[in-house]
Image: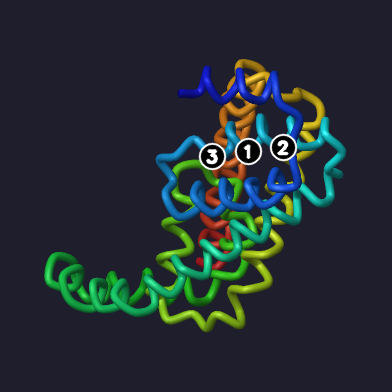
């Protein structure tokens, strides 16, 4: 299937629908994380940019699709997801622990959502959990838009550099995610050490 798509891209110039298609790809990848949307977006944005679409417009289409899907995830988390947390989860886990987790997301949710697109594997789950925590959408909207804008700007730039070469796109995402996990691990260790020191000073 991917080979067929690449062959089509090689033999056909992008049309007016190339931009909206980027939005559809971003929407699908955000709503259904198993879809390798990031790689497809890089390849398709490279193809679209080669036909005259600007990086900014590619980013806007990506942000629009991602933000709309994030709204769906947030709503699902806020309605049925909240019922799931209040019902089944509280029967399996101590209610106090569930309440603490919800409180943490509610308090620091905007910061978490602002970097959510850069956290592999759980980016969509974080939006769902923010909704189920009871966070108001007004607080979530700007961080979600910021995260989507930063992420899809990065992917659009990558697309303009690598073009529609899927091997290069896959290599970029693989190395990028490795470095992301390293950075996240370092940040976590720094926060952990800082917290331990603060506790010792209080004693």
- Residue 88, given in percent of the width and then of the height, sits at 16, 70
Quadrant in the picture for residue 49: top right
Give the side of residue 157 with respect to residue 1, left or right: right
- Residue 99, given in percent of the width and then of the height, sits at 32, 77
> Could you say which disc has been placed on residue 45 in the image?
2
- Residue 123, given in percent of the width and then of the height, sits at 50, 52
> Badge 3 is on which residue?
37
Q: CA distance from mark 2 to mark 1?
A: 6 Å
> Could you say which disc has been placed on residue 41 in the image?
1
Give whichever of 97, 52 is nearer the camera: 52
Quadrant of the drawing holding the N terminus: top left
Measuring 62% from the left and 23% from the top, which residue is drawn there? 8
Measuring 49% from the left and 50% from the top, which residue is drawn there? 28
Measuring 70% from the left and 54% from the top, which residue is drawn there? 61
Q: Are marks 3 and 1 in contact (CB under 8 Å)?
A: yes
Measuring 56% from the left and 25% from the top, which residue is drawn there? 5
Secondary structure beneath dot 3 equals: helix
Q: Are marks 2 and 1 in contact (CB under 8 Å)?
A: yes
Q: Note whether 58 is above or below 9 in the view shown.
A: below
Give the side of residue 165 with respect to residue 5, left or right: right
Give whichever of 175, 15 is nearer the camera: 15
- Residue 181, given in percent of the width and then of the height, sits at 55, 35
Q: CA distance from mark 2 to mark 3?
A: 11 Å
Crowding at dot 2, Cα within 10 Å, few <14 / some 14-19 / many 20+, comes out as: many
Quadrant in the picture for residue 81: bottom left
Give whichever of 186, 59 is nearer the camera: 59
Give whichever of 140, 35 is nearer the camera: 35
Q: CA distance from mark 3 to mark 1?
A: 6 Å
Q: Choose the circle earlier in sequence order: 2 or 3.
A: 3
Secondary structure beneath dot 2 equals: helix
Crowding at dot 3, Cα within 10 Å, few <14 / some 14-19 / many 20+, comes out as: some
């Amino acid at each position: 299937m991917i080979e067929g798509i690449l062959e089509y891209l090689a033999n056909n110039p992008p049309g007016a629908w190339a931009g909206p298609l980027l939005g559809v790809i971003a929407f699908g990848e955000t709503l259904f994380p198993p879809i390798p949307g990031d790689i497809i977006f890089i390849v398709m944005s490279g193809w679209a940019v080669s036909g005259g679409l600007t990086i900014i417009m590619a980013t806007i289409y990506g942000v629009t699709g991602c933000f709309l899907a994030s709204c769906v995830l947030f709503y699902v988390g806020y309605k049925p997801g909240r019922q799931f947390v209040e019902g089944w989860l509280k029967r399996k886990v101590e209610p106090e622990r569930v309440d603490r987790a919800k409180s943490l997301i509610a308090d620091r949710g905007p910061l978490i959502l602002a970097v959510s697109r850069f956290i592999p594997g759980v980016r969509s789950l974080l939006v769902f959990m923010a909704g189920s925590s009871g966070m108001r959408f007004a607080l979530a909207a700007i961080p979600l838009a910021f995260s989507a804008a930063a992420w899809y700007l990065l992917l659009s730039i990558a697309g303009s550099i690598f073009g529609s070469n899927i091997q290069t796109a896959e290599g970029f995402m693989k190395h990028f995610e490795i470095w992301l996990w390293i950075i996240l691990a370092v940040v976590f260790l720094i926060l952990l050490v800082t917290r331990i020191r603060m506790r010792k000073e209080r004693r």
